[in-house]
């Protein structure tokens, strides 16, 4: 990364509001030509290395989802405090919490229109869910490719492991599942390029991509034997990293709710 490039994180999640982005409690009060921010953000990627954050706060707390706005908040403001986590995976992204205590920012740091932040969040989710699914599928596909090469040369009872259906059939199963998720992601990206609704496609990729990828990497770890359980091989790290992506940008259950609302109808929305 060049010295001129900046790292910008997205700060939505809070201790009591993750999937329910409309339930955030961080406030932004307009005073003169400034906004004063107070609240706490949690589980934020690049919290420990970001130069700034696109932060979502309530400008009209009593309006619910309709009262959320987006702001650019520099990380070096003295009243912005970032504390890191010790995660089991995704170590380099520096996840942590952001604490805002009477943080003053110029009013021109608002991004977009006031009280239109929720629609910005939802639109962003539709893209990021597709990309997260593809990240997971890419990681799992690499693991499948490496494992295929291994089972061709590893022998058991005088034959390559690849000749046993107990080995080849699981590989085929995971390969097929990953391919289906990949092409659903491509379809979602194509719909987005056409300006068409793609929420259910994004949601399906987000809940199936990490799920199938975790299962595939786990299978690869088993097929590679006891060496794969050590840090000498990348499979254990990949497994830990992808498990974390089962949570970010909505759990499987949250994404199923998005799909159900789309294909069954809002009036039958599950709770």
Image: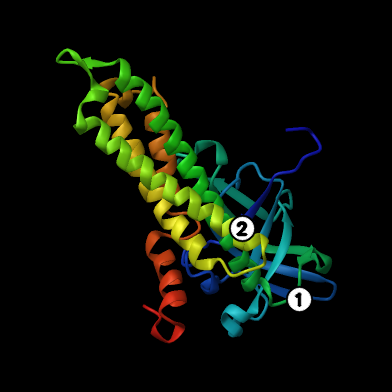
SS class, disc 1: strand
Question: Circle 1 sits on which residue?
Answer: 30
Q: Quadrant of the C terminus?
A: bottom left
Inspect this view and state whether residue 268 appears.
yes
- The residue sitting at the top extreme is 158
Q: Can residue 101 be seen here?
A: no
Quadrant of image for the N terminus: top right
Along the line of sight, the residue nearer the viewer: 89 or 47: 89
Of residue 235 and residue 63, the one placed in the foreground of this image is 235
* Residue located at (46% from left, 67% from top): 16
**192 to 228, vertically: above or below:** below
Counting from the top left corner in percent of width and height, residue 214 is at: 36, 43
Q: SS for tag 2? A: helix
Residues packed near mark 2 inside 10 Å, few (<14), some (14 to 19) or many (20 plus): few
Number of marks drawn? 2
Residue 108 vs 151, above or below: the answer is below
Relative to 154, 88 lies left or right = right
Distance, label 1 to label 2, CA atoms, is 40 Å
**Percent coordinates x, y for residue 49 in the rendering:** 64, 41
Frontmost residue, 50 versus 163? 163
Q: Residue furthest left?
A: 157
Q: Quadrant of residue 94?
A: top right
Question: Going by the image, does 30 lie left or right of 258?
Answer: right
Question: Hey, which quadrant is residue 219 in on the image?
Answer: top left
Q: Tell me what residue is drawn at x 57 percent, y 48 percent.
A: 45
Residue 137, x across and y down, in percent: 46, 43
Look at discs 1 and 2 and give the one toward the viewer: 2
Q: Which percent across, then down, holds residue 150?
A: 34, 20
Q: Is residue 254 left or right of residue 76?
A: left
- In this rendering, is residue 271 above or below 189? below
Residue under label 2, please give it. 190
Question: Mark 1–mark 2 contact, CB under 8 Å?
Answer: no
């Amino acid at each position: 990364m060049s010295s001129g490039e900046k790292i910008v994180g997205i700060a939505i999640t809070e201790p009591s509001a993750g999937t329910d982005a409309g339930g955030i409690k961080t406030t932004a009060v307009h005073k003169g030509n400034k906004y004063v921010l107070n609240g706490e953000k949690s589980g934020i990627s690049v919290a420990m290395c970001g130069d700034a954050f696109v932060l979502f706060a309530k400008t009209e707390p009593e309006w619910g989802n309709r009262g959320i706005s987006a702001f650019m908040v520099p990380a070096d403001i003295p009243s912005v405090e970032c504390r890191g986590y010790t995660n089991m995976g995704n170590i380099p992204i520096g996840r942590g919490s952001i604490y805002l205590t009477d943080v003053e920012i110029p009013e021109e740091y608002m991004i977009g229109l006031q009280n239109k932040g929720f629609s910005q969040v939802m639109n962003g989710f539709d893209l990021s869910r597709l990309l997260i699914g593809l990240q997971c599928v890419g990681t799992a596909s690499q693991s499948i490719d490496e494992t295929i090469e291994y089972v061709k040369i590893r022998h058991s009872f005088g034959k390559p492991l690849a000749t046993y259906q107990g080995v080849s059939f699981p590989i085929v199963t995971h390969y097929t599942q990953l391919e289906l998720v990949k092409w659903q992601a491509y379809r979602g990206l194509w719909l987005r390029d056409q300006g068409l609704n793609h929420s259910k496609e994004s949601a399906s990729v987000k809940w199936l991509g990490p799920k199938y990828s975790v299962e595939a990497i786990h299978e690869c770890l088993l097929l590679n034997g006891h060496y794969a359980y050590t840090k000498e091989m990348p499979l254990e790290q990949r497994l830990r990293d992808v498990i974390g992506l089962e949570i970010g940008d909505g759990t499987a259950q949250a994404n199923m709710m998005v799909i159900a609302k789309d294909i069954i109808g809002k009036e039958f929305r599950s709770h």
